[in-house]
Image (spheres, coloured by chain):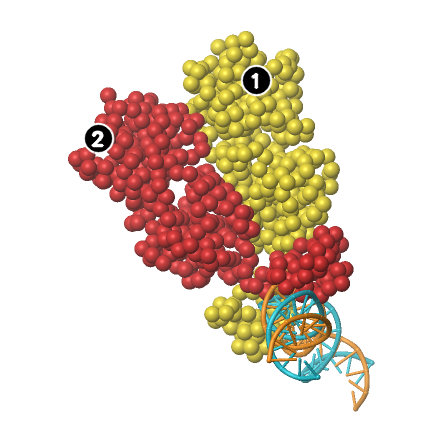
Chain colours: A yellow, B red, C cyan, D orange
DNA sequence: CTTGGTTGGTGAAACGTTAAATCACATATG
DNA sequence: CATATGTGATTTAACGTTTCACCAACCAAG
């Protein structure tokens, strides 16, 4: 019943444990004959080497963690974005014999598990410069890739979206349709956060078109489903004269459209809506959602590759900061102003 | 920079490593004075014990895995259900000092990592009796909890939904509204799968109401977004006379409603729709979706508790099979027949 | 004064692996 | 023939814990 160890293999194959080890890690020091014999026994005994023992010896775990701060209660579970992302990460990791451990962390929580478990790397989602969590993580001295967090420190590995361009494209599209009073459901405009960058793109598009920037049009409430839903009140305020809304998340856009619907406002006839993320269901909304596109799965893949480059050290010395392109998927939630 | 070990603590505190170990695991063999002293040093040195070393010695890892078979390509990423579930599991595990590793497995894949990593337990989602994956898992002899898989072997731990009741409630609701030709987008009716049970509930409701069962009304295509979307063709076939559809997943319902919408069929005026799962966005669909409710997060919590009971052995000897109740959330996608 | 128990502590082995150092032997080189 | 070169295997130590067996000191009881 006891697990079969490398010793058992050695004994049965009439060689030393080292030889077995060498065969396993094909170090090239072994004669073809012996290799065959050992492999044969390994097969028979169904031997698989203990990760703990290896970890102990090599001080690594072939384990990476995805760290997701519980920023706002409920924000996580309401956003399939993270799920798609994590799947992409898992896929990428698996291809390189790494496993992924999922970690929700609260504000005050300690990161002791990182050294306890000898985690080989961290993928940190959605933190920001100056965050207490960030400082803790940096002090850990473990390979990291930050996702969706603009860090000025260029020694940090980062995977970002071209958020500015996303903001620009969405806005430009609306402008092209004749809209002039374009509201923003931006979420908190954290300096150098993703929303901030998108906001910059929004401004650039306005400027380019010679349209005025009106701060009254910017709403920083959270871009969750309910957040979007509640914003409908403000958006339809007749004094605001809003004809289009750019929501910086698809879930928020969904909530908003619902809110508008209940108020008898039609999309896109009365108000055009642009979202952000291109979640799997945007095509199936009514109306389907015009949104800024990103391949989330692919993004997870790239992130994990960047992390593993650090870990296994074959840094292809691409830049440490990867900015992925975005594109606009035009669907039915936007229409020319009438 | 080398990690600080138990030896360092021992040296600095002028005691043996054994004593330090005893303090850490408060084994009660140590005098208050010594305890204080050692704890002090641990604090100073920021010592945290190596998980690998412990695992190696104790043959456990405080690690559980969530195993999600990649049944159909894309099925996973398109369903936020899994995300909510995994979050619930992670939350539950964290409360008990366990970590969760996420594992997508393909059909032919080996489960060697289970013994390699000394995983303490597995949560297996959506397999079924007779599945090759299942057989592999069972041969591993590791604590498991199966989710959404009806297993006749009563020695297995299972967490299920009252699927039959769900099917019954949804159908009854529709019948109560006057519908008689109720179609089913059921997904594959695998014997003893969740869909099968729901189907049983459907039949019971029909029977109770004295309505005939018409196999033509049952569609077994996959209940993904696209699956639902494509089904709209069949559903609207005038010869079928369908006035209501019960879709066994919310994502499928979303697709179907979209398909119907494009065909000019209005929900619920022309056709009533009932979904299943109560995903986070059902309230924000247009129309909002009547669906069978389950608290997914809570479900994850319960599952992990059942697993940990096995692992730490304090089996409160509740039954090994937990069936969670469902309820019907009536929203706007269902209406009386006119 | 011996015996025996309790209290607080230590030393050493073991968990399963890998890498560095070593060794035995055969073949090639001067 | 003696010495170098190489090949393929082995021995041993180390990774950081925990536990088992042991020990010293003290106190109580016979």
Front position in the image: A96 or A259: A259
Image x and y of residue A237, in percent: 52, 12
Residue B225 in view, yes or no: no
Horizontal relation, residue B180 to residue A289: left or right: left
Please name the residue shown 54% across and 47% down the image.
Answer: B95
Residue at image coords 70%, 55%: B36
Q: CA distance from mark 1 to mark 2?
A: 47 Å
The image quadrant that residue B215 belongs to is top left
Residue occupying the point 62% across, 21% down: A202
Quadrant of the image occupied by residue B62: bottom right
* Helix, strand or loop under label 2: loop
Residue B269 spot, x, y in % from top left: 30, 22
Residue A183 bears which disc, if any? 1
Q: Position of residue B255 (x, y in %)?
A: 38, 32
Task: List x then y, in percent, for residue A166.
Answer: 59, 27
Q: Which chain does the residue under circle 1 lie in?
A: A
Q: Which residue is mark 2?
A: B180
Residue at 29% x, 24% y: name it.
B335
Q: Residues within 10 Å of mark 2 (few under 14, many from 20)?
A: many
Q: Quadrant of residue A155?
A: top right
**Residue A103 appears in the figure:** yes
Q: Tell me if C3 is positioned left or right of A154 in this view.
A: left
Q: Chain of mark 2?
A: B
Residue B238 - label: none
């Amino acid at each position: 019943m006891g697990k079969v160890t490398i010793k058992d293999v050695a004994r049965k194959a009439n060689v030393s444990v080292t030889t077995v080890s060498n065969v396993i890690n094909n170090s090239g020091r072994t004669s073809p004959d012996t290799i065959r014999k050992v492999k044969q026994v390994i097969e028979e005994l169904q031997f698989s080497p203990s990760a703990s023992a290896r970890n102990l010896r090599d001080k690594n775990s072939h384990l990476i963690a995805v760290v997701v701060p519980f920023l706002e209660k409920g924000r996580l579970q309401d956003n399939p974005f993270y799920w798609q992302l994590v799947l992409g990460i898992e896929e990428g990791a698996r291809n390189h014999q790494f496993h992924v451990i999922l970690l929700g962390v609260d504000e005050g929580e300690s990161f002791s598990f990182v050294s306890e478990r000898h985690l080989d790397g961290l993928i940190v989602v959605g933190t920001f410069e100056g965050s207490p969590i960030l400082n803790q993580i940096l002090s850990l001295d473990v390979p990291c890739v930050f996702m969706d967090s603009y860090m000025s420190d260029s020694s940090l590995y980062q995977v970002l979206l071209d958020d500015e361009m996303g903001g620009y494209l969405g806005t430009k599209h609306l402008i092209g349709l004749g809209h002039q009073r374009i509201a923003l459901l931006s979420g908190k405009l954290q300096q150098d956060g993703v929303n901030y960058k998108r906001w910059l793109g929004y401004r650039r598009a306005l400027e380019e078109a010679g349209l005025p920037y009106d701060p009254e049009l910017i709403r920083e409430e959270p871009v969750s489903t309910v957040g979007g839903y509640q914003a409908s009140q403000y958006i339809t305020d007749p004094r605001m004269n809003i004809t289009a809304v750019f929501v910086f998340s698809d879930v928020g856009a969904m909530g908003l459209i619902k809110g508008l619907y209940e108020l008898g406002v039609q999309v896109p006839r009365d108000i055009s809506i642009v979202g952000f993320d291109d979640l799997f269901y945007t095509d199936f909304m009514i109306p389907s959602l015009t949104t800024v596109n990103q391949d989330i799965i692919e993004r997870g893949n790239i992130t994990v590759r960047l992390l593993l480059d650090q870990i296994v050290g074959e840094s292809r010395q691409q830049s440490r900061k990867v900015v992925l392109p975005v594109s606009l998927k035009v669907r039915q939630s936007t229409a020319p102003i009438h």
